[in-house]
Image (cartoon, coloured by chain):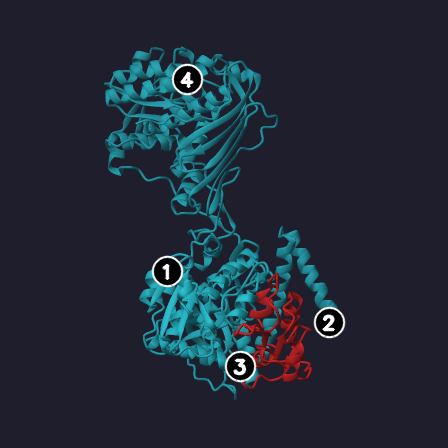
Chain colours: A red, B cyan
């Protein structure tokens, strides 16, 4: 795990808090392996889903997978086309939280 | 077997209702109402409970809402019954439901609404879990109650009003709970910089609730600056519009987005600092929204959904009862009201529940920002009654009713009616002349001095029929010693020359419609009467028909609102002999066939009454005419259709035919923003307003009355008003206005162009 991956992992931990409950790393994005090393396991009803692909389908799937009042962490590449969602159904009614975490090293390396 | 019997009975009832003229949908609802009636009685007997009746607001089909009666049992164990005073309107959600927006399409029929305030009327036995703290007469705010006059609800949903809490503000309790949940979802805002996007009811409440948590700074951002004064007055440190570039520099720790629009979400992202929390409080509706992934990741933003249903989920996850959580949050809001939280500006207009359709239309048009339904406007027996077990079912449609007549217009000066005794001479003793002569004999304060006609036989026949003198010499009509007013019931081309003689003799003038053969002659008559200082009127007796009087009262009471349209359809089947002697043939003359004598055909002969009634009912003035006609006799239109506009923007049509086989009944309808009045074939009114004698959202027929002697009333009122020195009911200007629109229609028919109606007011 390089410094960038380590820093990303720490930013994700900071975002989801100390007791996030069951965490699932979803998708096969560039940082999926390093994030799974930090968050192993495949819980059936995760409280947190860390989405690693950045693709619209991946974000949609993450919102559908996470439990009500849960958190979806966007930890994938910035998509060329932003995902279009039914925010009422996919976020609002279930009380979900979407947290954006930059996958870019702030130092620029 | 019992279920089959019940089903068969229900179908039989539906069939009976259909045979009685109810629609399929009404028959189904009637069956359901009867089923509910039976169920309520079984429960009442079993539980030894009282049956209460009230009214609630039902959106029964798309675009229409009305009050419908219902029954409930009085409070059982763990329940309270409350008579509501006000129920708050949630503008965003109820507007979305009314417009059937995505994610807001509720099944119909639907009873909208969320919370209200009222008084406890019945308290059920305490339950173990919820010891009752209610007593009859207590003022309470009620959660999760729709727009209704009466509710029986679990005790937990009725939150006592603390002393000092404004009751109408308390009705907002459910919306305040939603707003408080949104603030809570931000995760603590004490000492934080908070921005609220949206200044509607939810946004404003979110701001007020946020202020209770001691933020360091609050900014309200809205699409316009309309709410700036109230936001700043409520304690906002700053108010910005969404286009303001300063939004980008707000660097808010917490942004609460209270509108649900995609544009507002973009504004929220602009206002947020790195690491901020954006709370989606307003419900997004409509098409899919773009999730600003790049911005969320670049700035490490948290984007939190805050629908109220998630509060229930959160409560259950903590092991708490949802009822208790709602009660606690609601109590906090009410205590804040008692401690001085001021949201009275969010209470908004008080709307009559009987005018719900109008209210929701205004809400949909953006004319209503905040509001509530005020149930105290209803009579007590519509808010709550106790019903016996044997009382007949309440059907979900209004009872049949008719509108009683408004009564004959009062005399202008009752004292003058006895003193004036105006003396009339009738010139022209054909069919209409004879009718006028008889009417004068019957009219209060009038005396028929003599009947005049160049045909001595007609004059004599009229004189004998009316018991008065007769003559074939026009000069006998101009004797000021024995006559005060002259009625001209002669061919149209003779109106002007005879009128000049009458007014020159100093006598008042009544001209049988139309005022003259054309606009130029009418103008000459008016000017001559004005110079002579005598009264001039055109005989338009339709104004005094009972249904017209009722219709005018309804229009004045606001039943139809601003005029938007009118439709007049007239049919006659004039026999060939009509053209040479009228309908009876008493007066042999072919003047009706000659354009230079009649001035035209069916429009000028028959429709001037109707044009006057439109003006009389509504005060409208005609602006343009666009006509198409066809002639059976050269210069005399047999059929005509006229498209008319008014200066107020109404659009109407007059369609007339003098040769319709079978002569179908006439139709006369006017309509406005809020309702429609039909005069013929039978008088009736449909209005969305609450107007005495009507039920909003239904047709009410005018009650049948004895025939009014409208011509006698016309002459009686003329005599009273002119005798008292007042202008007649039908003024010279009224006669001219009708002449002008007829003139415009004929010019339009001739040129094929749309023509402006000449008007003295517009020309000066």
Nearer-the-camera pick, A36 or B504: A36
Whole-number angstrom distance, CA of label 2 to CA of label 1: 61 Å
- Whether callout 4 and callout 3 share a subunit is answered no
Residue B411 point in image, percent of width and height: 31, 37
Q: Earlier along the polypeptide chain: callout 2 or callout 1?
A: 2
Of badges 1 and 3, the one in the foreground is: 3
Q: Residue furthest right?
A: B1
Q: Residues within 10 Å of mark 4 (few under 14, many from 20)?
A: many
Which residue position holds label 2?
Answer: B2
Q: Residues within 10 Å of mark 3 (few under 14, many from 20)?
A: few
Nearer-the-camera pick, B528 or B356: B356
Nearer-the-camera pick, B199 or A36: A36
Which residue position holds label 4?
Answer: B492
Whole-number angstrom distance, CA of label 4 to CA of label 2: 78 Å
Q: Residues within 10 Å of mark 1 (few under 14, many from 20)?
A: some
The residue marked by circle 1 belongs to what chain? B
Q: Are marks 4 and 1 in contact (CB under 8 Å)?
A: no
Q: Are marks 2 and 3 in contact (CB under 8 Å)?
A: no
- Position of A4 with respect to B137 (left or right) is right
- Position of A55 with respect to B133 (left or right) is right
Q: Earlier along the polypeptide chain: callout 4 or callout 1?
A: 1
**What residue sits 28% from the left and 32% below the top?**
B720
Whole-number angstrom distance, CA of label 4 to CA of label 1: 63 Å
The numbered dot on residue B227 is: 1
The numbered dot on residue A14 is: 3
């Amino acid at each position: 795990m390089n410094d960038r991956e380590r820093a990303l992992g720490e930013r994700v931990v900071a975002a989801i808090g100390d007791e996030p409950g069951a965490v699932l790393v979803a998708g096969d994005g560039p940082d999926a392996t390093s994030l799974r090393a930090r968050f192993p396991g495949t819980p059936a009803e995760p409280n947190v889903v860390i989405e690693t692909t950045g693709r619209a389908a991946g974000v949609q799937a993450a919102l559908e997978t996470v439990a009500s009042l849960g958190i979806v962490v966007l930890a994938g590449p910035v998509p060329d086309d932003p995902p279009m969602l039914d925010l009422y159904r996919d976020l609002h009614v279930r009380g979900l939280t979407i947290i954006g975490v930059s996958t870019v090293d702030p130092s620029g390396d | 077997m019992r279920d089959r019997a019940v089903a068969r009975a229900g179908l039989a009832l539906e069939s009976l209702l259909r045979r009685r003229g109810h629609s399929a949908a009404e028959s189904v609802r009637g069956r359901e109402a009867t089923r509910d009636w039976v169920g309520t009685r079984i429960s009442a007997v079993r539980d030894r409970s009282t049956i209460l009746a009230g009214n609630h607001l039902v959106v029964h089909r798309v675009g229409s809402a009305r009050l419908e009666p219902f029954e409930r049992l009085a409070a059982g164990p763990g329940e309270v019954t409350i008579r509501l005073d006000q129920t708050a309107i949630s503008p965003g959600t109820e507007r979305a439901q009314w417009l059937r927006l995505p994610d807001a399409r509720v099944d119909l029929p639907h009873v909208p609404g969320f919370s209200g305030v009222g008084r406890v009327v019945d308290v059920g036995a305490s339950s173990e879990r919820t010891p009752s703290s209610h007593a009859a007469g207590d003022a309470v705010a009620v959660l999760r109650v729709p727009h209704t006059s009466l509710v029986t609800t679990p005790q937990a949903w009725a939150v006592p009003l603390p002393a000092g809490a404004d009751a109408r503000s308390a009705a907002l309790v459910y919306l305040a709970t939603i707003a408080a949940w949104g603030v809570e979802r931000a995760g603590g805002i004490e000492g934080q910089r908070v921005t609220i996007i949206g200044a509607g009811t939810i946004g404003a409440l979110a701001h007020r609730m946020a202020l209770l948590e001691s933020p360091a700074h609050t900014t309200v951002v809205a699409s316009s600056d309309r709410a700036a004064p109230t936001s700043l007055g409520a304690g906002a440190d700053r108010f910005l519009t969404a286009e303001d570039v300063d939004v980008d520099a707000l660097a808010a720790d917490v942004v609460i987005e209270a509108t649900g629009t995609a544009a507002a979400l973009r504004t929220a992202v602009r206002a947020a600092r790195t690491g901020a929390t954006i709370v989606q409080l307003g419900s997004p509706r409509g098409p899919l929204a773009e999730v600003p992934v790049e911005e969320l990741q670049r700035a490490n933003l948290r984007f939190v959904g805050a629908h109220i249903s998630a509060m229930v989920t959160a409560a259950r996850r903590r092991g708490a009862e949802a009822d208790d959580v709602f009660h606690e949050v609601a109590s906090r809001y009410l205590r804040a009201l008692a401690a001085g939280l001021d949201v009275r500006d969010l209470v908004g207009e008080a709307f009559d529940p009987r005018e719900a359709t109008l209210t929701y239309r205004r809400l949909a048009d953006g004319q209503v920002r905040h509001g509530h339904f005020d149930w105290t406007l209803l009579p007590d027996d519509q808010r709550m009654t106790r019903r016996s077990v044997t009382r007949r079912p309440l059907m979900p449609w209004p009872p049949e009713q008719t509108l009683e007549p408004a009564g004959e217009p009062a005399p202008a000066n009752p004292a003058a009616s006895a003193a004036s005794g105006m003396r009339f001479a009738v010139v022209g003793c054909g069919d209409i002349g004879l009718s006028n002569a008889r009417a004068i004999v019957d009219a209060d304060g009038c005396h028929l001095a003599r009947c005049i006609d160049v045909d001595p036989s007609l004059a004599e026949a009229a004189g004998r029929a009316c018991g008065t003198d007769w003559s074939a010499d026009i000069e006998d009509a101009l004797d000021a010693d024995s006559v005060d007013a002259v009625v001209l019931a002669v061919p149209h081309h003779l109106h002007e020359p005879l009128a000049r003689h009458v007014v020159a003799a100093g006598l008042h003038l009544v001209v049988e419609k139309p005022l003259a053969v054309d606009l130029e002659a009418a103008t000459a008559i008016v000017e001559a009467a004005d110079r002579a200082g005598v009264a001039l009127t055109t005989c338009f007796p339709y104004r005094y028909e009972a249904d017209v009087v009722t219709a005018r009262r309804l229009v004045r009471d606001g039943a139809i609102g601003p005029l938007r349209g009118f439709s007049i359809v007239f049919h006659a089947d004039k026999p060939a002999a009509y053209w040479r002697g009228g309908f009876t043939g008493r007066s042999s003359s072919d003047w009706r066939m000659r354009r230079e004598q009649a001035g035209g055909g069916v429009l000028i002969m028959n429709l001037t009454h109707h044009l006057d009634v439109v003006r009389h009912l509504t005060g409208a003035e005609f602006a343009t005419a666009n006509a198409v006609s066809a002639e059976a006799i050269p210069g005399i239109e047999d059929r005509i259709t006229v498209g008319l506009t008014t200066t107020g923007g109404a659009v109407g049509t007059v369609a007339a035919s003098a040769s319709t086989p079978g002569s179908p009944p006439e139709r006369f309808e006017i309509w406005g923003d809020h309702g429609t009045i039909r005069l013929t074939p039978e008088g009736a009114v449909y209005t969305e307003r609450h107007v005495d004698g009507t039920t909003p959202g239904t047709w009410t027929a005018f009650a049948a009355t004895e025939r009014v002697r409208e011509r006698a009333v016309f002459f009686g009122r003329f005599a009273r008003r002119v005798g008292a020195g007042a202008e007649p009911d039908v003024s010279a200007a009224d006669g001219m206005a009708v002449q002008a629109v007829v003139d415009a229609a004929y010019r339009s028919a001739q040129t094929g162009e749309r023509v402006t109606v000449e008007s003295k007011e517009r020309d000066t």
